[in-house]
Amino acid sequence: MLRDIALPFPLRPARVHEVCGPVASSFAACLAASVPGAVLWLRESWHSDTLNPLGFLPVLDPTRVLLARPANQTDALAVAEEALKDGAVALVVLEITRPLDLREGRRLQLAAGTGGSIGLCLIPEGMGSNAAETRWRATPVFDPRREDSTLMRWEIIKNKMGTLGAWNVCWNAQAHRLDLVSPAGE
Amino acid sequence: MFAGTHRRIVSIWFPRLASDRVLRARPVEGPVALSQRIGASETIYCLNTSAERDGLHRGMRMADARSFCPSLISQPARPDQDARFLRLLRRWAERYCPWVGLEGADGLVLDITGAAHLFGGEAAMLADMQARLARAGVTAQLGLAASRGAAWAVAHFGGSEETLLSLPVAALRLPADTVVALQRLGLRKIGDLAASPRAPLARRFGQDLLTRLDQCLGHAPEPVTPEAEPPQFATRMTLPEPIGLQADVQAALERLLIPLCQKLATQEMGARRLCLTLRRVDQASQQVELRLAAPMREPARILPLFARGLEDVDAGFGIDQMRLEAVQVEKLAPPQSNALQNAAPGHAPPEQLADLITRIGTRIGLENVQRFLPAESHIPERAFLLAPAAFSAPQSGFTTPRPRPLRLFPPEPIAAQGTEPPRSFRWRGMRLSLGRATGPERIAPEWWIEDENWRRGLRDYWRVETREGRRLWMFYTPQDPGWFVQGEFA
């Protein structure tokens, strides 16, 4: 019966959402593909791993991604607030390394409301903020039927204005859209 | 300009421009020479009179010069600095007349027609020039004549306008080989040349010789081109009463910005870096720098971008002087009228994005806002570049033969053996089992680049889908067996 609910994607604009799980970046990329214009991706400069633009290719044109590399989370939050308030970019992706308190989450929420852009925080498991509009968990699923599959399970684990749900989705690189897949064996 | 009037030209020659410049900055007694490296040997570029008295001359090798004169003080020549010094002298010379041009690399030419009486006549004017230059420590030889060529000849070879015809032919600004050829013909003086028939001279030496002769004798015109002042993108304001409120500083800044932006607009330039100097009553000064992500010249857009910098200013007892300078400017064509104002998020005009980058840049540094550019390499880490977004344009052209992971990390070793991906392995504390492996894709190191990470040689990359779901990018190094995880298709 969960499948009967329509996938609330793309996310509600002018709000800040959260996503956790191993394929949170893919979730962010799919969301970026569904909005026009540039996307600001904020990640602190000390991370040793890098985002690979070639990995974006099936989903998103990497030239649309602007990468900002603040030195710490305080700067990252300030930049995110500035960008959300401005509204020049339709999506601000923020990689979070420590939990946000209610004040910080609320400030981001207000900034998004002013500018009309979507904010998306990539959070480690269990570091969500109460101010978030929705919280998702994105996990990869092994697909025994198809090779080069991008099957993922997206669960909505917090929703302020709706019900929870879970969907199996798969990025369709040819049609350039998200396909809903019915779970196998159900 | 003065048609029919008798023109009067002054030529100033600085025979020791380079050494005079150095000695002005650091006066020393005794022989001084500037050296210049030509090919393998170091030769004298310029020297002072004391060194000349010791028997040194230009073009002499420094090794010889030092043996002639052990007390010689030498330093390398800086022709760029000399050119700057000459431009300064040119500006100074505008005190005599508005028409001042450069004459080669070591001279000035002034058209003083109609200006001499302001200084009490030509003789008084020349004496004034000579005295002021001597006081500044610059050796100068002056020549005054009715034409530019004659003035040059008098400045370089002495004499006066009346004795022009008795000066050597070298005074005609001719190439060295022409001078030698003329001397071989017995034409040693300008007078000899002027008296000989013109047609054979033109046939033998070309028209240039006759042009130079006519210019010297005043038969052919040769105007003085005054140099245009480079535009100065700076405005300043002195306040009758010191100010301290942020709103007041903003208002004053706006009044500085408007004329500055008008200046930029007339030159079709845009500011890239602005520097605001605030001078306080107690003589201390503070600077606020603003680096812009794109050249711009709209006061209304620049003003809010200064807001963050102005917050940190300590006004003390008040600010009474402000100076705004566009330190770095770039060409900026006049904008097209845009109808897309206040567009929806994502459809914002490019200026809005540039302003956002500027504001982010004032907080975290403009070079920390980056974009991806494609690069020509098969090595995964080098297949793209990160360039500051403010100083680069977006480039398309990302291609990849096979899917690449979204996240790359430094290779993490896993315990496994064999050339095929292991059936089960541990990675980051997780036990994973193999579901499907796609590969291998062999990537060879770029031998022309020394890379610590590729010491293990060839890599066979596999796309590994685990039963637990995680999709990893692993590689095996056949030349030095080992398995590593380098990325995740997150």
Image: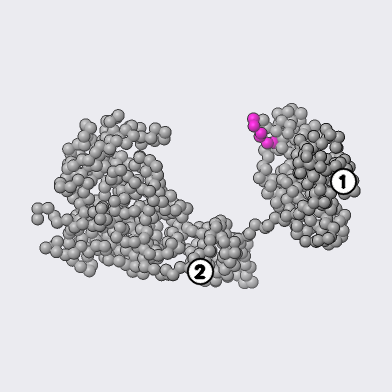
Q: Would you place residue B424 above or below residue B297 in this image?
A: above
At a point 53% along the width and 60% down the height, the residue shown is B332
10 Å crowding of disc 1: few (<14), some (14-19), many (20+): many
Q: Position of residue B384 (x, y in %)?
A: 38, 46
Q: In the rendered structure, which amino acid carries the disc numbered 2?
A: Ala
Mark 2 — on which chain does it sit? B
Q: Quadrant of the N terminus of chain B?
A: bottom right
- Tags 1 and 2 on a common chain: yes
Residue B39 drawn in magenta: yes
Mark 1 — on which chain does it sit? B
Q: In the rendered structure, which amino acid carries the disc numbered 1?
A: Leu
At mark 2, the secondary structure is helix
Which residue corresponds to mark 1? B164
- Decide whether the magenta segment is chiefly helix, strand or loop: strand
Badge number at residue B420: none
Q: Position of residue B162 (x, y in %)?
A: 90, 48
Seen from the viewer's position, the closer of residues B348 and B198 is: B198
Seen from the viewer's position, the closer of residues B126 and B69 is: B126
| Residue A111 visible in rendering | no
Q: Left or right of B169: which side holds B371?
A: left
Q: Position of residue B376 (x, y in %)?
A: 39, 42
Residue B106 drawn in magenta: no
Tell which circle, 1 or 2, labels the residue nearer the N-terminal end: 1
At mark 1, the secondary structure is helix
Nearest to the eye among marks 1 and 2: give it.
1
Which residue corresponds to mark 2? B300
Q: What are the residue bounds of the magenta stretch?
A: B35-40
